[in-house]
Image (spheres, rainbow, N blue to C red):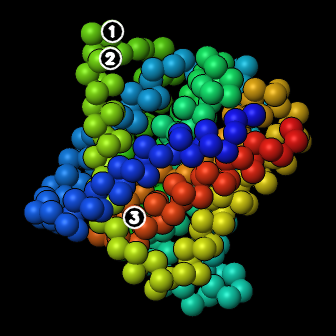
Amino acid sequence: MLRAVNYAQLLFPDFSLIACGWLLCRFTALDRRVWEPVESLVYYFLFPVLLFHSIVRSPIDFGATSNLVLAGLGVSLGGVALAYALPWLPGLRTLDRREHAASAQVAFRFNSFICLAMAERLAGAEGLLLIAVLIGVCVPLLNVAAVWPMARHANTGFVRQLLRNPLIIATALGLVVNLLGLRVPGWAEPTLTRIGAAALALGLMAAGAGMQFATLTRAKRLGVAVLAIRHFVLPLLAWGLARALQLAPAQAAVLMAFSAVPTASSAYVLAARMGYNGPFVAGLVTVSTLLGVVSLPFALSLPH
């Protein structure tokens, strides 16, 4: 079991990049006029390449991991259902529907890079293969679930938004390529790896540049609700599924980490590019990154 300080060290790079973006935008000449084109670059090119490469680089063995896939889908669909249901829960029926449409994704999406790092620390090479399976299966599903409420609320046409969304196109294409047994040529690997690193860094910095903490206070109940699902309810759901499906120790550990990591850093970029309240989502991404230091030890300490 990793010590709490190791979780803090693992999450520090993400948080520091968010802080850098915020400081640069607020206190230097690199203001919003600079960061808006950066968001477009991340959304339309860097993140799609990153997601495609993350999915295709490891073969997906569904036969050996069928129970893990079932548990991962259970956690993902549970998170989606709970996030969608928030406006109908007692005490939350007055939520702003646009704010909810943009921030619902925070409750169920996950940071793939932190997942990969955690899986390697917990179970070595086997852990990387297991998390690759979850990424390949769950990322396309969760990207569709993230786009749907925003497309529906904006009345822009759900199918059209899916067909035009670069993140969904990239993840679906990556899954097809993986299932066909195709691989990225060795000579292209270094380039794709560097693009992935740029996507992570610029995406997090753009989230920081767009962040306005005051927006969090205007929708406190919504923020608390989506973060509670992401960092408390989903780990408990994963724990129950791991026990019910009798997952092997390595699979159970990877599932628990998957359920408790911070939300996806691309949540801000997606909300901002679709015309929603990006600063509010950016604030939630930052708080989620901090909460990961607590939720990861909590999830991994549950008996499995």
Q: Residues within 10 Å of mark 3 (few under 14, many from 20)?
A: many
**Residue that appears at 51% across and 63% down:** 287
Q: Are marks 2 and 1 in contact (CB under 8 Å)?
A: yes
Amino acid type at mark 3? Ala
| Residue under pointer 2 | 189
Residue nearest the observer in this picture, 104 or 175 = 104
- Residue 204 falls left or right of residue 55: left
Q: Nearer the viewer, mark 3 or mark 2?
A: 3
Amino acid type at mark 2? Glu
- Residue 146 falls left or right of residue 240: left
| Residue 188, placed above or below residue 200 | above
Give me the disc on residue 186: 1
Q: CA distance from mark 2 to mark 1?
A: 5 Å
**Residue that appears at 73% across and 60% down:** 233
Q: Quadrant of residue 35?
A: bottom left
Dot 3 or dot 1: first in sequence order is 1
| Residue 154, placed above or below residue 185 | below
Amino acid type at mark 1? Gly
| Residue 95, placed above or below residue 21 | below
Residue 137 appears at what percent x and percent y?
A: 57, 36
**Residue that appears at 42% across and 57% down:** 267
Which image quadrant: the C terminus?
Answer: top right
Which secondary structure, mark 3?
helix
Q: Residues within 10 Å of mark 1 (few under 14, many from 20)?
A: few
Residue nearest the observer in this picture, 171 or 223 = 223
In this view, the residue farthest toward the top is 186
| Residue under pointer 3 | 282
Residue 271 in view: yes
Which secondary structure, mark 1?
helix
Residue 278 appears at what percent x and percent y?
A: 34, 68
Residue nearest the observer in this picture, 220 or 267 = 220
- Residue 41 falls left or right of residue 179: left
